[in-house]
Image (spheres, helix red, strand yellow):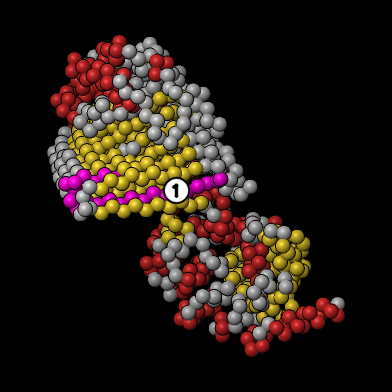
């Protein structure tokens, strides 16, 4: 579904991703871990097409197409979803309207009929159960005045409604208390179906107590330094990232 | 350059001129001009006297310069003060109205034939200096509502006109109100008798066609005890390279338990991208809550005019009366707007609410100016004001000039203000959910204006949304 090869990208003239390779198939859950500044969030934003990031080298193929040629909204309509680390507030725009507009854009793209507000309301209420969202949420402005936990739940709700083929979750677990973490994690698990791929960008292993990844990758200095199964996450939790740093500097010395 | 900065604008689609023979008075303004206008309209002596007093007063006044707007001095002797399509007699039925005029209004989206109109809206159509048609007059008359041109009101309802004309905006009030009082040519008159809720929306549509004439109309709305009415006004003008003066006066009077809701969508020609041409919209609008428990609500969406100078206000005289002002002012290119309101609390337990949303783009200057004045006897009066500005681009400006004067220590006055920009992150967030940049932009702007738009009657709200979209088209690159 997604093939990233030798990806170099940066912001304001500073290169952050330095030759990243990653292959993701439908039905897989990949966890991307790594220390601060290793390029995790950059990868998430580059995949979604954030305009501030510049791709200097490499290729990204999504469902057989060159992803980098598509505008951010086009990517979204074709099923790429990013759950933001810091979801954005849009004052005056109700969450229900926002989501309905987004949902209908995707339906239009698929050649399906748009849903009217009443039809959409039924769908939305159904999906809200996935993240145990209170119904008052519908009329509140997008993310405005939401707590950190509500914002993250809202991201997962949007994912549930928009039903993407590829979901990139950027530190969706950060800033959540234990109950919110459980709700969000359960929500993600319910959405992880065999036709979808999920990339979890995370700092900590704790999210992975709820969601079992098929692959764990350690991102270090803009490249994937180590890949493994779910045990790798536990190993990182125990040993920290220092041993990766050491292994990497050894590799450079020998190289 | 950021995505939000590139500027262009869609063609002003109301910029056409109707080719019609007009009858005009000679250029310039003297006592003779005033007499001539009055004669042409066949007015009674008292009306002429009132005009002349206003004119003599105007001669002693000076043009105000305190507004945050800049324009070359207006030569008042180079304006044509009266222009009417020929033949100028008012028509009994639409069959007798010049087809060119009907076509003009049809093109503006205001069909005047009653079969074609939205069934819930009665329209008074004003072309340059005269009212060309008023629809649904008979139907309204059945419930006692008078809705007609100002000229007809002077003839048919002289007592009402004499009692209320100038009672809210006296001709001594300000320079432009005095000028209007001397030379006003037409406008709308509306009277809702005791206990009647007006069964349909009333509206006036103003059209300036002549390139050298000013438009000076007057609107007078009276809601008797327990009456209520919702009134809408719309305006457009052709594109001309020179500026035209529009100096209107609107007076509203609400008696005990009466309610008047006045909504405006102002889309006068704004001039081109370099600021050439456009309307000078210098307007005095004021309502008086004369009776107890009365309510006057102003809602305006100001998108046109080269310069806007306008402060729809409420005098809260009756105890427990309520004044409201909801405004969206959008300026683009070289437009300048200095607009806001005055809430004068006189009676006890009076309440007022001000919601102002300014959107500036291009090189425009957008100012909110408002006065909240609590008089000594206005016990327990309340005001809440909120002024929000949204900047699109780096070359425009937004200003807020709130004046607050409190003379009663049981009153409570609140003022909130904010200035924001549409961030690239907001746009990216919307893009990531599948919305195009244009759609994201207009959704965010509509969200910003929501508190005001929801005060508009349904059809108007749809038009306002569409209008903002059109005005801002191209501001996203």
Task: Write down the quadrant of residue A147 in the picture.
Answer: bottom left
Residue B387 part of the magenta-drawn span:
yes
Specify the subunit that label 1 lies on. B
Task: Write down the quadrant of residue A226 in the picture.
Answer: bottom right
Badge 1 local density, few (<14 within 10 Å), some, or many (20+)? many
Residue B235 placement (x, y as % from top left): 39, 32
Residue drawn at x 62%, y 58% is: A72
Residue drawn at x 16%, y 46% is: B377
Residue placed farthest to the right in the image?
A255
**Horizontally, is A42 left or right of B379 in the view?**
right
- Residue tagged 1: B389
Q: Nearer the viewer, residue B249 or A48?
A: B249
Instruction: Find the magenta span and give its range.
Output: B372-394
Q: Is residue B41 visible?
A: no
Compared to A14, does A245 lie above or below? below
Residue B132 placement (x, y as % from top left): 32, 23
Residue B410 part of the magenta-drawn span:
no
Q: Is residue B207 visible?
A: yes
**Horizontally, is B38 left or right of A7 in the view?**
left
Q: Nearer the viewer, residue A227 or B372?
A: B372
Compared to B247, does A104 lie above or below? below
Residue B264 placement (x, y as % from top left): 35, 38
Compared to B383, does A64 lie above or below? below
Residue drawn at x 66%, y 57% is: A70
Label 1: element kind: strand
Residue B376 placement (x, y as % from top left): 19, 46
């Amino acid at each position: 579904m997604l093939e990233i090869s030798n990806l170099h990208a940066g912001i304001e003239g500073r290169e952050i991703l330095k030759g990243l390779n990653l292959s993701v198939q439908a039905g897989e859950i990949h966890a991307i871990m790594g220390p601060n500044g290793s390029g995790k969030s950059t990868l998430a934003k580059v995949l979604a097409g954030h305009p501030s990031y510049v791709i200097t080298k490499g290729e990204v193929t999504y469902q057989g197409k060159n992803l980098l040629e598509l505008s951010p909204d086009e990517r979204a309509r074709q099923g790429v979803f990013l759950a933001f680390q810091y979801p954005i507030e849009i004052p005056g725009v109700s969450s229900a309207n926002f989501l309905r507009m987004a949902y209908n854009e995707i339906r239009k793209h698929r050649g399906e009929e748009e849903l009217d507000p009443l039809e959409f309301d039924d769908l939305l209420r159904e999906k809200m159960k996935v993240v145990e969202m209170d119904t008052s949420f519908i009329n509140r402005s997008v993310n405005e005045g939401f707590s950190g936990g509500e914002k993250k739940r809202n991201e997962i709700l949007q994912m549930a409604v928009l039903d993407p083929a590829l979901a990139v979750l950027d530190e969706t677990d950060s800033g959540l208390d234990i109950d919110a973490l459980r709700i969000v994690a359960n929500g993600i698990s319910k959405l992880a179906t065999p036709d979808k791929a999920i990339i979890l960008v995370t700092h900590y292993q704790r999210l992975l107590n709820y969601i079992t990844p098929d692959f764990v990758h350690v991102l270090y200095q803009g490249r994937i330094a180590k890949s493994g199964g779910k045990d790798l996450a536990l190993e990182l939790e125990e040993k920290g990232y220092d041993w990766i740093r050491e292994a990497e500097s050894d590799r450079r010395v020998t190289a | 350059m950021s995505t939000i900065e590139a500027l262009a604008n869609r063609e002003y689609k109301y910029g056409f001129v109707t080719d019609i023979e007009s009858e005009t008075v000679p250029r310039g303004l003297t006592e003779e001009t005033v007499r001539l206008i009055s004669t042409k309209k066949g007015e009674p002596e008292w009306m002429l006297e009132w005009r002349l007093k206003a004119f003599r007063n105007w001669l002693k006044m000076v043009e105000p310069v305190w507004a945050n707007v800049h324009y070359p001095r207006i030569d008042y002797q180079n304006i044509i003060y009266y222009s009417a399509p020929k033949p100028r007699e008012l028509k009994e039925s639409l069959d007798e109205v010049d087809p060119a005029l009907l076509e003009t209004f049809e093109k503006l989206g205001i069909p005047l034939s009653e079969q074609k109109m939205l069934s819930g809206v009665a329209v008074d159509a004003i072309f340059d200096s005269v009212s060309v048609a008023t629809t649904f007059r008979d139907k309204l008359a059945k419930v006692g509502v008078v809705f007609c041109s100002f000229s007809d009101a002077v003839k048919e309802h002289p007592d009402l006109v004499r009692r209320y004309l100038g009672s809210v905006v006296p001709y001594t009030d300000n320079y432009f109100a005095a000028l209007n009082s001397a030379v006003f040519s037409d406008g709308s008159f509306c009277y809702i008798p005791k206990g009647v809720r007006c069964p349909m929306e009333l509206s006036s549509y103003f059209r300036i066609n002549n390139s050298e004439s000013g438009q000076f109309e007057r609107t007078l709305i009276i809601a008797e005890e327990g009456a209520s009415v919702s009134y809408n006004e719309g305006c457009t003008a052709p594109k001309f390279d020179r500026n035209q003066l529009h100096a209107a006066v609107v007076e509203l009077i609400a008696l005990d338990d009466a309610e008047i809701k006045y909504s405006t969508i102002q889309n006068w020609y704004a001039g081109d991208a370099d600021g050439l041409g456009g309307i000078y919209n210098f307007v005095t609008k004021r309502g008086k809550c004369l009776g107890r428990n009365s309510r006057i609500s102003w809602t305006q969406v100001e998108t046109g005019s080269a310069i806007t100078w306008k402060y729809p206000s409420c005098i809260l005289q009756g105890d427990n009366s309520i004044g409201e002002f909801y405004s969206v002012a959008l300026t683009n290119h070289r437009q300048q707007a200095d607009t806001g309101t005055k809430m004068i609390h006189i009676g006890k337990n009076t309440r007022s609410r001000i919601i102002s949303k300014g959107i500036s783009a291009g090189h425009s200057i957008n100012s909110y100016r408002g006065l909240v004045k609590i008089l000594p006897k206005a016990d327990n009066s309340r005001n809440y004001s909120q002024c929000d500005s949204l900047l699109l681009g780096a070359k425009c400006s937004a200003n807020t000039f709130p004046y607050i004067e409190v003379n009663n220590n049981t009153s409570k006055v609140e003022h909130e203000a904010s200035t924001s920009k549409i961030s690239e992150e907001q746009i990216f967030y919307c893009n990531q959910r599948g919305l195009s940049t244009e759609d994201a932009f207009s959704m965010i702007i509509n969200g910003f204006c929501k508190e005001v738009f929801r005060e508009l009657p349904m059809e108007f709200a749809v038009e306002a949304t569409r209008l903002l979209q059109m005005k801002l088209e191209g501001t996203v690159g």
